[in-house]
Amino acid sequence: MADSKRKRPDKDGTHRLAFERAKKRIYASQTVCGICGKPVDFSYKYPHPLSPCIDHIIPIAKGGHPSDMDNLQLAHWTCNRSKSDKLFSKKQKSADDGIISNRMLPQSCDWPAYRGR
């Protein structure tokens, strides 16, 4: 099967229903982007850059589970697109070494402060 035609198990495959159930639970219980740490406004709808979406903490392409709640988090659409299928590790030692996070991503733009010219 060609790469562009490859099915994603969370969208078209065996994990679709479990992913949709997990997505509803996350939308009902989380309010902060797991990538940038800023609040997510559910009034924004796709394709707005700050619209809510579900991020796979460990990307499916890197072996992450497609529908496990421990591998899913709330994110802004633009944060999720910036992260893509990258994995991030902490560079500094701190007291929180036991916490795994991907909030170390560089931010391309502060969208709430953005003003078109």
Image: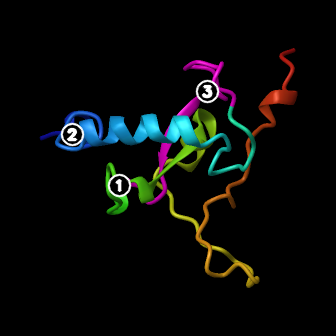
Seen as rendered, the residue at the extreme left is 1
Residue neighbourhood size for the residue with mark 2, other residues' Cα within 10 Å, grouped as few (<14), some (14–19), many (≥20): few
Q: What element carries label 1?
A: loop
Sequence-first disc among 1 and 2: 2
**Of the numbered discs in the image, which one, if any, rests on residue 51?**
3
Decide if residue 29 is on the left or right side of residue 40: left
Check disc 1 and report the residue beneath it.
68
Color scheme of the displayed model: rainbow
Q: Is residue 102 shown in magenta?
A: no
Identify the amino acid type marked 3. Answer: Ser
Distance between mark 2 and mark 3 Cα atoms: 26 Å
Q: Position of residue 56 (x, y in %)?
A: 45, 51
Residue neighbourhood size for the residue with mark 3, other residues' Cα within 10 Å, grouped as few (<14), some (14–19), many (≥20): some
Write down the quadrant of residue 14 in the picture: top left
Name the quarter where the C terminus is drawn.
top right
Seen as rendered, the residue at the extreme top is 117
Check disc 2 and report the residue beneath it.
6
Foreground label between 3 and 1: 1
Write down the quadrant of residue 45 in the picture: top right
Q: Do the residues labelled 3 and 1 touch (CB within 8 Å)?
A: no
